[in-house]
Each structure stands twice: as C-alpha cells, then as structure tokens.
Amino acid sequence: MIHKEMIAMLLAGGQGSRLGVLTSDVAKPAVSFGGKYRIIDFPLSNCINSGIDTVGVLTQYQPLVLNSHIGIGIPWDLDRNNGGVAVLPPYEKSDASEWYSGTANAIYQNLKYMESYNPEYVLILSGDHIYKMDYEAMLDFHKQNEADITIAAMPVPLSEASRFGVVITDEEKRITEFEEKPEHPRSNLASMGIYIFSWSVLKESLIAMKDQSNCDFGKHIIPYCHDNGQRLFAYEYNDYWKDVGTLGSYWEANMELIDLIPEFNLYEEYWKIYTKQTTIVPQYIAPEASVEKSIISAGAEIYGQVVNCVLSAGVVIEEGAVVRDSIIMKDTHIGKGAYVEKAIIAENCQIGEGDQIGVGEEAKSQLNESVYAFGLATIGENSVIPPHVKVGKNTAIKGMTTEADYPAGELPSGGYIIKVGDES
C-alpha cells in the first residue's frame, strides 16, 4: 500500500466575487499575477519546495483555465506515478450529485482520495493567497508539540482582526480559544486558513460533521475539535502574505512587485515559483518606446510609453499610447494614442485607438461600490472597447462594446457596461 507522510489538499473552488469581472469566467486561483504567474502557482510551488509531492486540487467554479494550467503538474515537478497533482472536481455519486458546499465539505467528499495515500498528516491550503512558506517547518512544529491540529496564524493589526478567524493562545502557543470573525477581537493572531491535521483527527471530525450544512473549517471543524479536547496549536508566521481577494489588494500586490527592492521577491534561487510558461518569444521594445519601473513578460511588444506597470505575455502597446500604474494581462492590445491609468485589464482585450481609460474624478460605483472601488477601471477578459471613448474611475466593463454603449463617447466614473448577461 502507498504511504505518504503528508499530502496537501488545495482548495481552489472559489468564485472570488470581490474581484468582479476579473472572475466572471475564471476561478480566482487562476487569475493572472505578476505578469507570468497565476495565483495558484504560489501554494503549488510552496508544496514542491517543501518536499510535498502529492497535492489534490479541489476545483468547482469555472475550472477550465485552472485545469488546463495545472495539467499533469509538469511545471511544478508534480507529474509523478506515485502521488503528483490531481484535480478533484465534485463528481456525480449514485445517490445524488453534490456541489462542494463549504471548505470542509469539499475535503469530506474526497476522503477516498486521501485514504488511498494512507497519510499521517494532511495539509489543507487555500488557493488564493500570495506568499512563500516552508510547510516542512510547520510540520516539525506540529510533531514537536504532539499536536492534533496546527493552524498557521499571523499577527494582523487589531483593527483588521474581525475579518479573520482569530486564535487565542497560551505561552506554549497552544490554542485556548478560537473565534470566527469576532466583532470585538481579543487577539490579533489571525488564522491564515492553512492547517495541518493528524489524519485520524481530520477523518473523524469530517465524518462527525458531515451533515452540517455548508460545513466549513473555521466555523465547524476547528470548534468541534477544540470542544472535544484535541490539541490545537498556532504556528506563527511573520513573513509576506497577501490575500488578493479584492481589486484593491490585487492591484497593490502586483504594484509591490515593481518596487526597487520588492517586499516579496519572486526571483530567489532557493525558493522558486514555478508556472506553466507557454510564450517563449522574447519581448520587443521599439527604439521610440519608453519603459520605466515595470515588469514586461515574454512576447510583449511595446511601441509607446509604459510607466509602473505589470504586463503579461503577448501584450501589445501601440505607438503614442501611454500606460501607467496598470496591470495588463495576456494578449491584450492597446491601440495607438490610447491613455490608460490605474486600470486592471484582463486577458485578450482590445482597447481602441485614442481611448482614455481611468480618467476624471472618482465617483461611487453604481454596480457594486464595495467591489469597484480604489479608483480603478476594471475590464473583464475578451472585452472590446471602440476607439476614441473615455472611461472613468471605479468602472467595470465586460464584453464586446460599441460606440452606442458610450453616450457622448463616455462611460463616466462609477458607471458600468456588462454585455454578456453577466452581473458580476
């Protein structure tokens, strides 16, 4: 029988609705990051760098891009006969077909997969955070404390703690109390949604809680184990960790990569971030072009001016176009003389000649003011914007738009055009 000391289960089914039109056609973990990566590359690379060679990736929402990106795991050296990476969508059972309904329910539905490796420990990860972490060091901590569950936790400002599950520990780092998103937090140690379970404890708790609707680790499994006297410990993490769950934090995390000495270094030899690289043509920067403080990926062609941007593979910036403080994803084309400022433009978009994107005064979004904020103009994938129109801030566009969609040639700040029956 196969035996693995520790396997990883990576939750990658999330819709990421706070990323608006960026995730209307792709799962959040498959969203592009840093020019050449996708968000899921970070936890997958952490696994292989930590010596974990068996990873189950649980997908659900819009999994096509994610599935083809992961493939059989070659970029992460996870194409193994024994172990490797497995994509685990919800599947039809004889009695009923069930979507994953909560993080713990998703893991419960894959008990057989985990059992087939007879693991001693199971590492549970979320697919939508940007960070580097040695899970082996966390496992050593788990063993030293003879823990049943170890939760990775990091100090956050007390004012933000109510957004997280908060742990209260004694001086040994043993968890005495666990509060899910408390209104008045009594600790600033926030759970990162990264757990190591001893296998027998995980299996028992998942079976015991299987009828709980929307069964979730933070709300149900952790409190259940704590109430039943299991040994819970907090493994404190103090390095870079970013939840890129909002357009603002996603934009910020990308922009931080351009800093002269970035807080998060993508280029460390000893902790590589691996990804599936399809474009291998070099980038081209024309003699008349100018590029300042930007990340430019393979196959990009630049004839205009680029300042403080992250550009993915195959992006074309035509002559006279100026692009500032923006994230432009794969194969997007920006027409002659266009001006783009503080925008997030998804894959395969066409920005017309002379367009002005991200200009004017800020106004509240009429579509969803909690999503489309931060002064950003956000354009979903495969969108087309006709020439010579103006698009304001806190705007959202998705689909093939025409001049008729822009009264007086403008989409004012706070406005939106969603063409494909998609109200993200």
Image: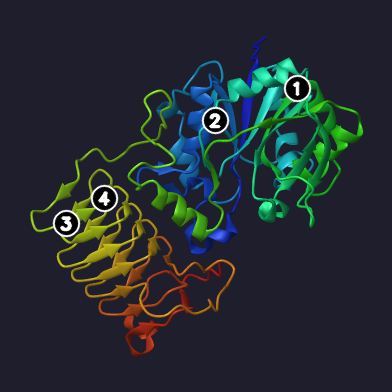
The residue wearing badge 3 is 290
Residue 252 versus residue 89: which sits nearer the camera? Answer: 252
Marks 1,3: beta carbons within 8 A: no
Q: Secondary structure at mark 2?
A: loop
Tag of residue 199: 1
- Residue 393 location, x and y as percent? 43, 74
Based on the displayed image, in which of its 4 quarters is residue 207 positioned?
Answer: top right
- Residue 185 location, x and y as percent? 77, 51
Tag of residue 314: 4
Tag of residue 133: 2
Amino acid type for the residue under numbered disc 2: Met
Quarter of the picture holding the N terminus: top right
Q: Residue at x 38, y 46 (%)?
A: 257
Q: Secondary structure at mark 3?
A: strand
Residue 12 versus residue 283: which sits nearer the camera? Answer: 283
Amino acid type for the residue under numbered disc 3: Ser
Tag of residue 79: none
Based on the displayed image, in which of its 4 quarters is residue 361 positioned?
Answer: bottom left
